[in-house]
Amino acid sequence: MSETPKPLILTGAKPSGELTLGNYLGAIKNWAIMLEEYECFFPIVDLHAITVGYVPAELRKHTYQCLAQYIACGLDPQKSHIFLQSQVIGHTELSWILSCLTPVGELHRMTQFKDKSSKPGASVNAGLLFYPVLMAADILLYNADRVPVGEDQKQHLELARNIAQRFNHTYSETFKVPEPYIPRAGARIMSLQDPSRKMSKSDENPGEAILLLDSPQAIRKKILSAVTDSDTEVRMAPEKPGIANLLNIFSAITGRSVEDLEREFGDSGYGTFKNALADALIAHLEPFQERYREIIEDKTFLHGVLKEGAEVAQARAFKTLRKVYRKAGFVERA
Ligand code: TRP
């Protein structure tokens, strides 16, 4: 351990049951790299998960699955703090204080709220509207220096920065204003069926995304039926978004350059190229899947990770919360 404290990075993810290859290559793989340079907090934001309709038993199952997948992906719980948002007192407390500093209009203007609340049949509950304030609390509770966020969360991080500044201005200097963390080289993995969209899990069309826990047969089937074009050349080009996406995936998992792959597969035809990619993916995911199967069965281990994570997080959270309550004028508990 070095003497000077490392800067603190925090990023939250909702407990989705199965992670996609896009989640892994676009985010989690980079988190594992951050462990050396930063002190890392990885809350699984289960309280955020209930802002849309959900099934309680599924939430619990997905939370375990998410945790086990993180660890199997290489997030070392010895080197980071992985915990559940719902197990640390302070997230919702701070979010209340912050919500009293947040104009409702700002929340109504959040793109994600507008999208989610305009979906047919959406339950537009107050939690959905307050979602970004809880996210700000997640970040500010630990005085995070940096927050890795994808495109879709930039607006929420900007709001968290505004809220931090508003608190500091209204009371006195308390919170660090968090900066976005731009990963050195995050692969942007697109849908296999519509390469203009980000790869994400879709129940209607499972062919869109490779899941990290997909069987070898499923992986091959999805890669072979990935959308390409009527040409035959394996080449990186803007007018060939399907092939470009597959080349990016191939390069990200093997570490080979795109040029190198083009040289090998340029004229081999799409079938050969896709089969080679499927082979590489299956081999790449095998150790992950094996590790996952071990961990998911071992509830004692998983509970231990969560307990340790929550202990560290709770100590920090109480410290911030005490300070915030004092500044906001609450009488200290004797
Ligand atoms: N809102 C984020 C998402 O949907 C998840 C999230 C919650 C988060 N709290 C956070 C991300 C704190 C970064 C920091 O992806």
Image (cartoon, rainbow, N blue to C red):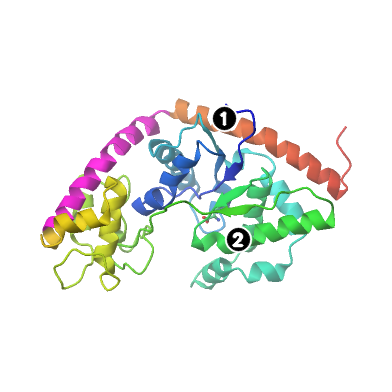
Residue drawn at x 49%, y 41% is: 34
Find disc 2 in the rendering and name its residue: 156
Residue numbers of the magenta segment: 272-298
Residue drawn at x 24%, y 64% is: 243
Q: Nearer the viewer, mark 2 or mark 1?
A: 2
Question: 216 and 187: which one is in front?
Answer: 187
Q: Dots 2 and 1: beta carbons under 8 Å? A: no
Q: Quadrant of the N terminus?
A: top right
Instruction: Indicate the position of residue 124 as horizontal and vertical percent values.
Output: 59, 67
277 over 84 or under it: above or below:
below
Secondary structure at numbered mark 2? helix
Secondary structure at numbered mark 1? helix
Find disc 1 in the rendering and name its residue: 307
Question: 120 and 250: which one is in front?
Answer: 250
Asked whether residue 77 appears in the rendered view, the answer is yes
Q: Earlier in the sequence, mark 2 or mark 1?
A: 2
- Residue type pointed to by label 2: His
Residue drawn at x 57%, y 57% is: 51
